[in-house]
Image (tube, grey):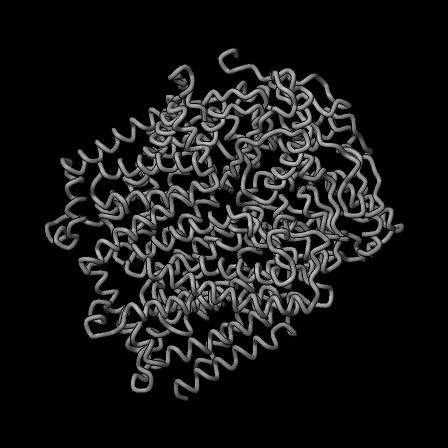
Amino acid sequence: MISRRTMLSASMLAVALALGGMSTTGAKAEDCSITLGAAVSLTGKYSTNGKHTKNGYDLALKVINGKGGVKVGGKTCKLAIKYYDDESTPARAAALAERLIKQDGVKFMLGPYSSGLTKAIAPVTEKHKVPMVEANGASRSLFTKGYKYLFAVLSTSEQYLKSAIELAAENADKMGKKPNELTIAMAIENDPFSQDIRAGVMEDAKRFGMKIVIDDKLPKELNDMSATLTKVKALKPDILVVSGHAKGAATAVRQVAEMRVDVPMMAMTHCDSAQIIKKFGKDAEYTLCASQWAPTLKYSDSYFGSAMDFAKLFEKTYGYAPPYQAAESAAAVLVFKDAFERAGTLDPQKVRDALAATDMMTFYGRIKFDETGKNIAKPMVLYQVLQGKYVVVAPSKWAEAKAVIPRPKWSERK
Amino acid sequence: MNRRLRHISALTALFAIGLVGPWLMPAYISQFAQLWLFIVLALSWDIMGGQTGYNSFGNIIYFGIGMYASAVAQVGVVWPVADYTAAKGGGTEFVFTAEQIYTGLALGIPLGGLLAMAAAIVFGALLLGMRGHYFAIATLGLAVAIAELAAGWDYIGAGSGMVTPTLPQEIEGPVLFYYLSLALAVLAILFYAWLYSTRFRLAINAIRDDEDKAEALGHHTTRNKMTAWAISALFTGMAGAIYGNLSGFIDPHDIAFNAEIGVWMILMAILGGKGTLWGPIIGAIVFFVSKELFWTYLLGWQRVALGLLIVIIVVFFPEGIMGWVRSRWPHLFAAPHLDGDEGNAAAAATDERKEAANA
Amino acid sequence: MQNLQLLLQAPVFNIQLLLDGMFIGAVFALAAFGMALVWGVMNIINVSQGEFVMLGGFITLMVVQAGLSPLLGIPVAAVVLFVLGWALYRGIIWRIVEADMFTSLLATFGVSIMLQQLMNEIFGADVRTVESGLGIWFLFDGMVTVTQIKVLAFVLSFVIGLALWLFLKTARLGQAIRATAQNARAARILGIDTDRVYAATYAINAALCGAAGALVVMAWSIHPYMGLPYTLRSFMIVIVAGLGNLAAVISAGLGLGVAEQFAGFILGAEFQLAFVFLLLVAVLVARQVMLARKRQYLK
């Protein structure tokens, strides 16, 4: 009788696996559709940005298919994307990548949101020799491992706040100091990606001889950073650097205003995905924000048109202005399309080689990969919130206005 | 067919499936590896929660300790660990040969288990004096605190996590870790089957049923609790060591000390029926398969479904699948003169329910 | 230790930390009232406590989106959560009241993950805040800032605690709740509809959490996965304070809030939670060691 129970559980397994097998939708040659696989965070702590990522992918898919699809070796193929929810957890993401490749027969992958998840997936795609173009894994350590099938359209993490620190050095005299007398306070979330940003800030600070006076790692659950900000008030640093995805940006902007923390410069990441202008209005003024991309940049391509055209189309489709996470995700799909057409085949190895040779202009900026797979052709930009708008203030090539440094004290604001 | 024979034939069938499974369904090898590890986790939770009556929310501590200990050992046999973690999972210079990988695993997995066991002895001395929900919450608090400490410790990568050694091309990772998981599961199942056939089981069941009486009867209750807790940690730690390698990347919150896996261990044991050998095994299989199905077909709603499943399990099947089978087909279990403890356990469980209703 | 020196050199920052700690602690206490009540009366540890707080926040968000005053969110959230609590009792909880505590832990855990993802589907995972429309007070030349909504949260926690105490002391239902807590069987024999008492208890708990959530979204922020830390802190407060002593719950809540702020300041934000939970374990171990001398144990 026991064996009957064993059989029961065994047959349950079998049923489960059969069901699993039914969902297999590989890239089939007959009807010529190309399926890209993607594990994105629809739930969990990254789901806000996971959604931006998915919207970016979907919009690019729609535009490419709307303009006739992808021409591969004389055939016209439609693109499709198979999604799974990785729940913002690396273990899940790795298992899903395995599933996409082995069970669903996906031959090309798009990246997940966040470096942590990309780190989890990259070894899997690498092992199966599946090319992955990712748009949201900026951690530098992804590109020191000699991965051959990983390509990233975005600038890597150490560059995120580089221009903010450089801007501080340039404007040190306005704060009445020499660059090497400046002090930095860091409040950075304790996750792989944010910690990479921290490493970048520390390197830049060292380069200029600046001193780090606060180095707090924010826990993932924290919705209150008043203890850290009290420290900022006490130590009066010149630059406050905050990075903690959308939650960190929102919490910092709000509490800095509430507690009337006066710092000459406040630089952070993820401002636009946290929608700080819409949510906090005047309290967001003068915040410096690192961004991969801005709609005001003069980049353009033949699919979306200019960066501004992309922003308009995105807003029309999804009802909100595109954060850079959506833009870079859309760009990743364009890169795949370009590579498919240049390869003229769907052989993963040939597509991989075509990807490696990518050198194209998109609405998101120029994309050209170095031998480690990261994009070396596009700079980061730095916004400042001025009069309720994001205004590019650095690098100077793209600057629309001069940065306001130091920020006016709270008591002097209306 | 007597019980012992049924027992042996079921075990043989399970192991046989385990051996040939990967050839039949090669695409699912990583999931199967996880399943075997989950069986170990559920069984190891059950020795405390089901057999000794100490409901631990903190077994995830041993999972995480085992995982980190093994990863540190595996890296440490070749490279300085601090350099490796400072490089955020290493660059191209951190190469491991196949031999180094095997040495690392041979060293790391037992070390993970032993270190977890050592931790269990220390924590046991502190916590095992508490009973009921105080024990449950103290272990939960400890688990949260240790996760946070791990996330603040730079040597093991702090919040950036730690990448387990990258395998050289000639090693098929999933296959290797599948057989390691299978081996661990076989070891664990045989060990627990043996353990539960000894008087030790009666001793820890006595603690569960009435600790004061057991103590009054001259049982070394403290020693027995500690032994059970240490065994539980040993296997949980080894499962963690393999799980870390299987996932390739260790994050302090999301993988090593993942509170959710901590709850799943408990849930699997309850689902199958706690206080039995087969309960946690069946529970793990049913839970894992339904979880995978939810995650595949109910995208975005998988947790709602899982939550509902949990509620249904604990509300309608508080005794688990084994308990339900037992009340449905009692004759299957009716051989008290052979190894009567399971019959007694059933009776004890019924008594417990009555008591709870009266309380 | 440099941070410690800072506090000694500029004592005014102690005041800021103390105030911030007390404000957040008062909200922890509000959620802990309900947990103590449900634990004491029904012998259930409600793991979905933090999710009720989260729901209260989202309801306030809806109130604001409907164009009403955010402060109205506090009563509305309480009422809606009361109804939801009642419904949850009628649907699920009544089946597990008599079961052992472990069953209820798991069942309410199931409820909590359902609520999490449900809210994620409805509202998305964004961090949400609501502007209360209240101002900020500046003390000590702007060195210390106090947002009025946090003061309101603080005062309300006390008022609600007092009201709850009065309710349990004098109201008919309150007395029935206490009677049921003391001896459910005896209460049943004396004609108390214990089932209704349980339903009311669970609903009141949900309502308290709802009010707390409304305050959290105005003073701090909410998102669908914020629940667990609130649940854990409620646990901790109730364990330290014991059941059935509302004054102790408030002081434990305030103490926890203050301890967290100072830990965050001195040890750095990364060790804030670790400190708090090690403190929990230490408190339990200390109580255990003291009891063990008398050959008793924590149960």
B317 displayed left or right of B157: left
Across and down, in percent, residue B289 comes to 52, 64
In the rendered image, which quarter contains the C terminus of chain B? bottom left
Across and down, in percent, residue B102 comes to 64, 69
Identity of the residue drawn at 30% across and 76% down: B202
Residue reaching furthest to the right: A74
Identity of the residue drawn at 45% across and 42% down: C271
B62 displayed left or right of A371: left
Residue C185 shows in the view: yes
Across and down, in percent, residue A172 comes to 65, 20
Q: In which quarter of the image is residue A334?
A: top right
- In depth, the one of B174 and B111 nearer the eye is B111
Q: Quadrant of residue B104?
A: bottom right
Across and down, in percent, residue B167 comes to 68, 62
Identity of the residue drawn at 69% across and 33% down: A292
Residue A35 shows in the view: no
Judge whether A293 appears above or below B51 on screen.
Answer: above
Identity of the residue drawn at 55% across and 47% down: B154
Judge whether B79 appears above or below B177 on screen.
Answer: above
Count all numbered tags in the image, as a single digit.
0
B126 displayed left or right of B91: left
- In depth, the one of A401 and B39 nearer the eye is A401
Residue reaching furthest to the left: C190
- In depth, the one of C91 and A199 nearer the eye is A199
In the rendered image, which quarter contains the N terminus of chain B? bottom left
